[in-house]
Amino acid sequence: MSIAQQPMPRTGSRRRVMSRKARRTAWFYAFITPWLLGFVFLWIVPLTLGFLTSLTNYDGLNLPDLKFVGLNNYARAFTDEDALWSFGQTLKWTALNLPAWMVLSFILALILNQGVKGLGFFRTAYYLPSVVPTVALVWIWKIILDRNAGLLNAVISVFSPGTAIAWLTSYALQGLTVIAVWSGLGWGMVVFLAGLQGIPDELLEAARIDGASTLQIFRYVTIPLMTPVIFFVLVNGLIGSFQQFVVPQLLASIGGGAAAGFTQVPPRPVYLSMNHVNRQIFNFQRFGYGTAMLWLLFIVVAALTVVVFKTSRFWVYTEAKEK
Amino acid sequence: MTTRLTRREMLKLSGALAAGSVLASCGPAPTPEVVKETVEVPVEKTVVVQATEAPAPTEAPPLSGPIEGHVVVMHFLHEFTEDHVNVFQGETPGITVEVIQADLTRFFAMYAAGSPPDLLRVQAPSIPQYLARKMLYDLTPFFEVSEMLRLDDLAPANNYYKAYSPLRIGEGPIYGMCKDFSPDCTIFVYKPVFEDGGVSVPDDTKAMTYDEVFQAAQTLAKFEGDRTLVFGYDYEKGWVDRFMMNMLAETGGTIFSEDLTQLVIKDNEAALAVAKWYYDLGAAKLNDNIINPSPAGWFGTDFTQGIVGMAQYGFWYGAMAESDVTAGKVIMLPGPTWTGVRRDPTVTATGMIMAAATQVPEAAWKVFEFYNAGQPAVERAGSGWGVPALKSMWDQMPNSSDYEQQKLRVLQGELALETPPLQFNPFLGETTVADSWNTQMDRAFQGEITFEEALANVESEVNAAIKDGVDRLL
């Protein structure tokens, strides 16, 4: 038998099969590596460092003499009056902002879903505040709501001269809500509108044929089918509300000056948890305490999110449930 | 034989790598050599910081040979410009300069990573804290051999950068210098507000007392119903603690205990009176604050719009005090006095220091010299945005218009007040006291708490911060 006629060694063929598998494996890792690296170095490492920081007396400059303080920073948060106040205000702000924002966004989406003329224009117009830089946005509202030179007080002063209501300080929580709802309306509206446009026409048609009124269609068809979207918006809004920082901080520039900026403290009604954390870290150089509070906030937000998820089976409609 | 990794093993390995990197990151960053100090904590609550000496003197620098290196400067980019960098690099081959925007967060991160900027823009109140942490490079040997920067040419405000220890600012080795400075308590007057209020414009050859300032502010402030049309007087809220210290220093007082381990206002009659003065001013809505916000967001802008009678800012503000509205109607007054004993009203003294951890001290010094005595310094001197840090440049300040000449006349009087600098607290960040004060007074202004409660809260907050600082540093 000539060499040419000899069968190929079985090992060679196995190697080809294995290398194909190896190639597939290599591709698998090649595809997930960027995400994995990002996850490890941009999430796991910073989070771990953040947690370790929360167990120390780190002040930004004392790395060589760092002291381990155990859970003292966490315990401190429960006796710190300002931490408790800011947390209370954060809850109030969330309770005020979240329903207002969701309801108004939903109403706006419902209106725009009625096939109005110039839908594209209105959609763009309502979404516009969402793309305005936050600093500009706060200043727009300051021009309107300022105590001494604001347009609103000027208008009221026509009827009641000398009116000077401190909308952004005495009514800062309401003022913040107005600003945040207005600026967030576009995003909420777009998401709700996408959900509304995803509701099959045949379902609405069938309900109409069955004699359902507009209100009944809304109550028994639209709302149930929108619950997954409402759930998504609710979770995002909840997390976003607890993370609110920039707008109150910008409101702090009222009465600011050359030394203003992120070292200033927002008006008391909108002194939220994130602002307290910022103040503790940058004004008091308590990085350890600040990060401990961030972890506590994370736990609260995670717990609330879990509650929303757990209760979702009672109110979020899914087709899977029907099967 | 080849070994094939399973996915599980791969993930384990990734985890191990991540853990390794975390642990590596937690290791101590390279830090400058530290000179041990003797510190005693003899009794509870009374911390005695004994002989906190300055870092060991640096040896005479070898500045004669060719110097090379890359120097990182953390500064405001509009103050240390790209043009400055190009000029310097053109004149000084071998040294490259990178200017990064001054940013406290970034500074902390760079310091934590063991690579702080070689040169850093700072304000005087931060010097004691940085010194206590051994973060500053002793520049005395450089100054002693420099042909551009002579110690005897430095204006007195530079004494903020001299120290025998963090607790003895004002004399000793020098760790930096002002880029320029201002007697910070001078008052800019918008004359039409005085005329409208029926008040004669104050004499610019005589310092007002703070009581007179208060009375004038009361007369000048103009309201329509609840609305404020004109603010009588205003000041930089972020520096309120510095102003208080300066007022009390007239008679040797301060807002701190002698060993700087306590903020004492409530039980310090003199400090309480100063604190009350500031509270009363705000409560009466004579200046901008939480219950009487500035329409422009900053009283400096309000002044240029003609709605502030008196704005207390340093000489630098003179460069912008005249707008289309206020041009030709502004004068500068000497800083007011609390007790009648005047003192140097410089409380900011913004300048530059060199990090003790720098790997390129000679190259950094060359940049330091250039910025503080070269072209940038000359430009600053001629701009009017501050008093040059070098006395030899004082004649370069603008003096062509009546307004500029008037400012210079008043300035001469302020510069003649050569008094020791304020001793800022090494256990506190530079914004801590003002932050606490403004936060608590806001609450008092809004009627949430009383002035006395606000004051108690300020003391409690600041003393907790001092205790943290003492624990960290000692």
Image: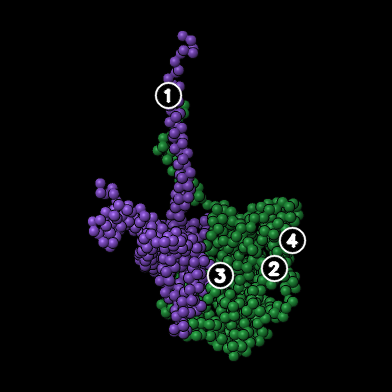
Chain colours: A purple, B green
Q: Amino acid at mark 2?
A: Arg
Q: Are marks 4 and 1 on the same chain?
A: no
Q: Which residue is mark 2?
A: B380
Q: Amino acid at mark 3?
A: Ala
Q: Name the secondary structure under disc 2.
A: helix
Q: Residue B321 location in percent, x, y?
A: 63, 76
Q: Which residue is mark 3?
A: A259
Judging depth in this view, the residue of A276 and B124 nearest the camera is A276
Q: Name the secondary structure under disc 4.
A: helix
Judging depth in this view, the residue of B363 and A268 nearest the camera is A268
A229 left or right of B243 in image: left
Q: What whole-number distance in Å separates the C-alpha atoms at marks 1 and 3?
A: 72 Å
Q: What whole-number distance in Å separates the C-alpha atoms at marks 4 and 1?
A: 78 Å
Q: Indicate which disc, 2 or 4, sits on the residue closer to the N terminus.
A: 4
Q: Which mark is residue B145?
A: 4
Q: Amino acid at mark 4?
A: Val
Chain where mark 3 sits: A
Q: Are marks 1 and 3 in contact (CB under 8 Å)?
A: no
At 42% from the left and 61% from the top, the residue drawn is A117
Q: What whole-number distance in Å separates the C-alpha atoms at marks 2 and 4?
A: 24 Å
Q: Which residue is mark 1?
A: A14
Q: Are marks 2 and 3 in contact (CB under 8 Å)?
A: no
